[in-house]
Image: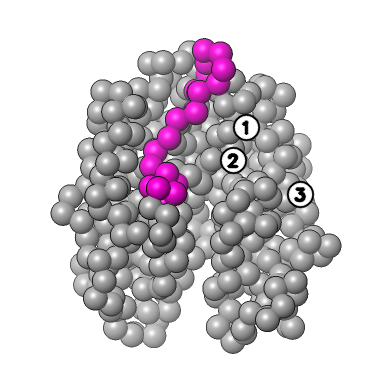
Amino acid sequence: MLSRLCLLLVSLVGLVSCALPPDSPLFQPSDSLPAYDQDSFDQYVSANRAWIADNRVFLSDDRNVEIQLNTPFELRPDKPAKRGILFVHGLGASPWYFSDIATAMANDGWLVRSILLPGHGSRPADLMLPDFDDWENIVAHHAGLLSAEVEELWLGGFSTGANLVTSHALTDEDVAGLLLFSPGLHPDNGYLFLAPIISHLWDWVDIDDEDNIATYQSLPTHGAALYYRSVGVVQKKLEATRFDKPVLITMSQHDSVLDPNATLDAFQTRFPNQQSRFVWYGDTPQELDDPRVTALASRLPDRRISTFSHMSVLFAPENTYYGEEGSYLMLENGQNDLSPPDDLDNLWFGAWGHVVAGKYHARLTWNPHFLDLLDSIREVTGDG
């Protein structure tokens, strides 16, 4: 979803008018957002499932699957858990993004929860409704609920969600560690600071076909402004203090919307714990002298993979929707001058906008190194 922010840059520089949505419920906000401050996680899940059923604009005939992928969820291990982790998804995404990692961690004995950020799970226009306080408050509320049930609390986040959990952890002594996947700490977009201003003038950064049941394809400018706010908050906190507990950070060298080198520098200067690890998907960074950093190859020609994408780290190759043989193929990938091949066996995979002569790249939506990622999680959390 953060790739759509690049289109905001194009709109600003080209001085084009705002994107105009079609006359569809997808681009008309719901009357209200669901509550998130229930006394128990079960009550929260039940209320949000009912709200999604009533307010979602369904994209397929299988309403139950769409509701399931967008509803907050909990996985409990066979035995009472001493450790718990709360996962927070990214801009436009869904709680289901953590399903593969959550399953593995629950099998390792963790109590795992994944929440739904207000404005998600229903229709893209609902990203016009939340305030930034809603996003901060839902993280704080559910971190508190989980902390009351376990002896050791961890937080995990993807992209924008990583910003939110990092901000919270810097002021919550109960948090024992962080798992941050493609954290949006340092965007690679010099015009992002204009997003709050533009949100008062234009409603949409981008209008796109909505065919992905787990992710919004279109982005309101208010959603971009909320992401920008998360960047400002977490950067200010990290400038003031360091997070001295264990953290895992993953980053693709070829991330299309973030600054990987700035993220690596933040890891080395603001996350000093020697148990921490940074998993870098790409070539080994030059002049790197930090044993906590592991570089894994992102060019895998035998699997027709050129680069890793912003989102690919989270999903196992066996994932039935985003996996190597999954049912959803993200063909539209920012290559405006190329067309997908008729023979999908000739399709390559990479980050948004990756261009190589003679090769069409769909988005890489799974992690060929997924088992290595699980080992890194176990190493950082002390389960290894």
For disc 1, the marked residue is 104
- Amino acid carrying label 1: it is Ala
- Amino acid carrying label 3: it is Leu
Alpha carbon separation for disc pair 3 and 1 = 21 Å
Up/down of 168 relative to 18, above or below: above
Front of the two marks 3 and 1 = 1
In the image, residue 27 lies at what x, y percent?
27, 67
Q: Which mark is residue 100?
A: 2
Tell me the crowding category of disc 2: few under 14, some 14 to 19, or many 20 or more residues within 10 angstroms, Cα based.
some
Which quarter of the picture shows residue 4? bottom left
Which quarter of the picture shows residue 361? bottom right
In the image, residue 174 lies at what x, y percent?
43, 20
Range drawn in magenta? 64-85
Q: Is residue 79 magenta?
A: yes
Local secondary structure at mark 1: helix
Front of the two marks 2 and 3 = 2
Left or right: where 76 falls relative to 356: left
Q: Which mark is residue 296?
A: 3
Colouring chosen for the image of the structure:
one colour
Mark 2 and mark 1 residues within 8 Å of each other at the beta carbon: yes
Q: Nearer the viewer, residue 52 or 133?
A: 52
Left or right: where 96 falls relative to 364: left
Residue 132 at least partly seen: no
- Amino acid carrying label 2: it is Asp
